[in-house]
Amino acid sequence: MTSTEWQKSSFSGNVENCVEIRTADSSVELRESDEGHLTLRTTPATLASLLHGVKAGEFDHHA
């Protein structure tokens, strides 16, 4: 499997507990840095749809 290095948001600063992302083959992987053994794998299209929904406020009623 070809993977890139884990990256975290620049908004995280020097904080250790943050969401990290990388590409792996044709997938995108996400993990929380303090739970590195748990990885969520999805497609780029599915992640794009999720981010679009978050930005549009589709999930605000869950807060």
Image: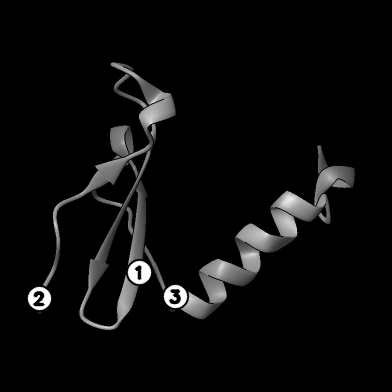
- Residue 50 in the image: x percent, y percent? 63, 64
Amino acid under disc 1 = Val
Which residue is painted at 83% across and 56% down in the image?
58
Q: Quadrant of residue 63?
A: top right
Which percent across, then down, holds residue 15?
Answer: 33, 17
Badge number at residue 28: 1
> Can see residue 36?
no
Q: In the visual, does 37 lie left or right of 2?
A: right
Toward which corner of the image does residue 28 lie, by quadrant? bottom left
How did the renderer colour the structure?
one colour
Q: Are marks 1 and 2 in contact (CB under 8 Å)?
A: no
Q: CA distance from mark 3 to mark 2?
A: 16 Å
Instruction: Determine the image quadrant of residue 60.
Output: top right
> Do labels 3 and 2 touch, CB within 8 Å?
no
The residue carrying pointer 1 sits among few (fewer than 14), some (14 to 19) or many (20 or more) residues within 10 Å by Cα, namely some
Residue at coordinates 39% horizontally, 32% vertically from top-left?
Answer: 18
Where the N terminus falls, by quadrant? bottom left
Report if residue 48 is visible in the image: yes
Which one is earlier in the sequence, the residue at label 3 or at label 2? 2
Of the numbered discs in the image, which one, if any, rests on residue 44?
Answer: 3
Q: Nearer the viewer, residue 6 or 11?
A: 11
Question: Looking at numbered disc 2 in the image, what kind of residue is underneath it?
Answer: Thr
Q: Circle 2 sits on which residue?
A: 2
Q: Amino acid at mark 3?
A: Pro
- Outermost residue toward the left? 2
| Upstream in sequence: badge 3 or badge 1 | 1
SS for callout 3: helix
